[in-house]
Amino acid sequence: MTLLQARDLVTTFHTAGGPVEAVRDVSFDLDAGETLALVGESGSGKSVTALSLLNMVRPPGRIERGEVLLDGRDLLKLGEAEMRTVRGGELSMIFQDPVSSLNPLLKVRAQLTEAVLAHRRMPRRAAEQRAVELMTRVGIPDPEARLSDHPLAFSGGMAQRVMIAMALAGEPKVIIADEPTTALDVTIQAQILELLAELNRENGTAVILITHNLGIVARLCQRVAVMYKGEIVEQGTTDEIFTAPRHTYTKELLAATPSLRRPRPPMPAPEKPEPLLEVRELTKSYRSRGRTLQAVAGVSFEVGRGETVGLVGESGCGKSTIAKLVLGIEEPTSGHISYGGSPVTGLRGAAQRAYNSRVQLVFQNPMSSLNPRMTVGQAIGEPLRVRGSDTSRVAELLELVGLPASAAGRYPHEFSGGQRQRIVIARALAVEPELIVCDEAVAALDVSLQAQIIALLRDLQARLGLSYLFIGHDLASVRDVSARMLVMYLGEIVESGPSDEVTATPLHPYAASLLSSVPEPDPQVERERERIVLRGEVPTPLDPPPGCRFHTRCPIGPLARPGRTICRTDKPPLLQVSPGRAAACHFPGELKEDSCAH
Amino acid sequence: MNGLLRGFRSPEARIGLAVVVVVLGAGLLAPLLAPHSPYAQTSGTFLPPSATHWLGTDEYGRDLFSRVLYGIRQDLLVGAVAVPIGAVAGTVLGLLSTVWGWLDTVIQRLFDVTLAFTSLVMGVTVAAVIGPGLPAVLITVGLVNVPLFGRLTRNAVKSLQTRDYVTAARIVGVRPVRLLFRHLLPNALDALVVQAALSLSLAVFIEGAMSFVGIGVRPPEPSLGSLLRTSITFLDRSPLYALAPMVVVTALVLAFNLIGDGLTKGLLRR
């Protein structure tokens, strides 16, 4: 039975530069209890479509025509007062950034009971009781106590649960989820997706999921509508779209999506690479208000000449700190870093500049890593100029990263995210480095651009013999570029080995759960897969658990097997398990996801 | 489009700019526009407005319109000399305090001390030291602006220092001085321009206040503040006397504030 229908929806933004049609003749049906995905890259009109459904488009945007029928009623013709009962009532929405969607000054109790009371008259007591039920429903432990907390006391994952609880307060028939897990770590994302699937299954709540991640679509959705430049270019069941895409854009999107199951492109793996960067027992602690935060806790690894080493972990695991230490932006608390045999720590002035002409950095956010007041030519020419080299190489560098020489005269804001990342890479290449540290270098880009930048990095490696330390949270894209991989958890390396082996047969239970959390862009696989969903949250590095740092969440640790007290008391060292592979676990290789083979 | 440019094109800034251009233009062209000498005394005191004396005359029979026009020139001078000097001094101190930690402490405490004086108290202090007059006004306006620009520059630079593009510049080998002038200062400029508009408004206000209490520009020299001061005595005989300088001061202060608001809006809107 059709529950929600969008008919020829057109939403236009009347900007100073002329009207922009953000949504063009969008039509789709949503059946009761169905999960529909709206897929597309940033700027394709997904979010504006969602706002149009709720009649919440703000000026300069305007819904020009079309209808949104909910049970046959046209929502766009309703008055604002009526519409308010629909929003959060029959039709609820959850957003990407849960923490900023909650009022930081009000306790969760107040916000949740307010949401309950907004849609049903009942005594305050009953509403608070309902709030507790909702908190329990979305899996927040100790709901009574947590209701008295302010939103900032909640982690990202827990805050998103609160948002979902608020969305459920009016017992909606449809939940519109706009990139609900994009701001979250993979293991937390898996938990939230599980929750949404459960709500859909058990309460029959229909879900419109807006996402750019095809893996999530494969896991959660029955039908897919692919959006491109404001239009729905293709829709169908998830199986149809994934197995027999018709539109070229859909095909490109599927091809660009990184997958752990697709064979990765061949990779230059030097037999016995000459070690370039050597890191030994590196630690970094920050002190703040008398407390010590150990961001990096005894990490050792090396990167060989011409090699790419991947460093994977969730937010807060210390991977970006390692990038800063390796570049000499920050000084380690203890341990050694040496480059080409000479120590890197304590460099200043000319020595630091000399070192940085061999080791460069590419940042996560290409929007913030270019000076808005300098033209592209000035930005790329600057490293040349300060070295007294010939600035005429700018054109050559632009060409190297696939941009026209005419780009030099323009300003960064005139370029798209992917192009800017190319400019950042060109600037790094200007000093002719040997090693480039890529700190989440593709995380802020759309998948199709990610694939392009990764291809560029690989091509540059082949041409210039570069080495990379590729830091990321996305296992699939890290695997695609790196020959070897290091997995980090709470400041420590828990597993290392050749990338394809680590992703095929992980030894450490954290690596295994991380792999299991990554949704595959294949509905067949996602249906048959038995997933390891980690419980709980990453502990704070201010107070890491004793013994094995992972034991508080480990599916094969003392939580699941009470006899394993060793995990609580003894820290497992990173030991070689088989040639080239090491894991820091007392029981390596025990946890496997059955369907995780190639 | 550039944020500042967009700010200058906002309705507020356009109105503000129009008023400023008209008023300051009138002051600048006073020798050409004024129908009489601002010092020429006639026997007709407290004359009502007429064709020869557009705003009437004052207690010595001088033409009020001409005196107001010449009065604007004092504000022009304060705005064109004292504000830029204060702004540059403040910006330089602000920049210096981002370079060395110990100097930061010293400079910030100095700023604290200067900020603790309200502008009029500062004016009284300056006048007590060097004596009342236009120089006292100039020095006061300059001094008041130093910590305003200093704090702003320091905070802007401090927050810019953590930007990725600054880190990027450092690790491609850009030295501190170039970093400051090529990457940090240009990006802090927006905030400084907004402050400049507000500082001009403050300058007009301070000149008015100091001359009004008698420690700024002193009669017979006309200034908006000194005209107001004298007019108070004759409020019952000639209410128009006070009105003209008051309107001009208010218009200028308001106009500069409007420009500041417009600029802020332009910068905030993305």
Image: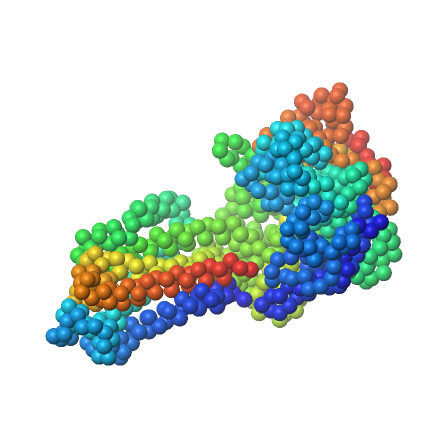
Q: Position of residue A308 (x, y in %)?
A: 71, 49
- Visible residue check, residue B243: yes
Colour pattern: rainbow
Q: What residue is shown at x 20% (from left), y 78% (from top)? A: B36
Q: Position of residue A335 (x, y in %)?
A: 58, 36
Closer to the camera, B198 or A413? Answer: B198
Q: Where is residue A133 in the image (x, y as percent from the top left)?
A: 69, 32
- Visible residue check, residue A421: no
In the image, is residue A489 above or below residue B114?
Answer: above
- Looking at the rendered structure, the number of numbered marks drawn on it comes to 0
Left or right for A192, reference B264: right
Q: What residue is shown at x 63% (from left), y 61% (from top)? A: A61
Left or right for B60, reference A242: left
Q: What residue is shown at x 67% (from left), y 51% (from top)? A: A83
Left or right for A12, reference A173: left
Closer to the camera, A572 or A123? Answer: A123
Extreme residue toward the left, this view? B43
In the image, is residue A368 above or below residue A18?
Answer: above
What is the quadrant of the C terminus of chain A in the image? top right
Q: What residue is shown at x 14% (from left), y 74% (from top)? A: B44
In the image, is residue A275 above or below residue A69?
Answer: above
Left or right for A184, reference B131: right
Q: Position of residue A274 (x, y in %)?
A: 69, 47
Tell me which corner region of the image, top left, top right, bottom left or bottom right, holds residue A593. top right
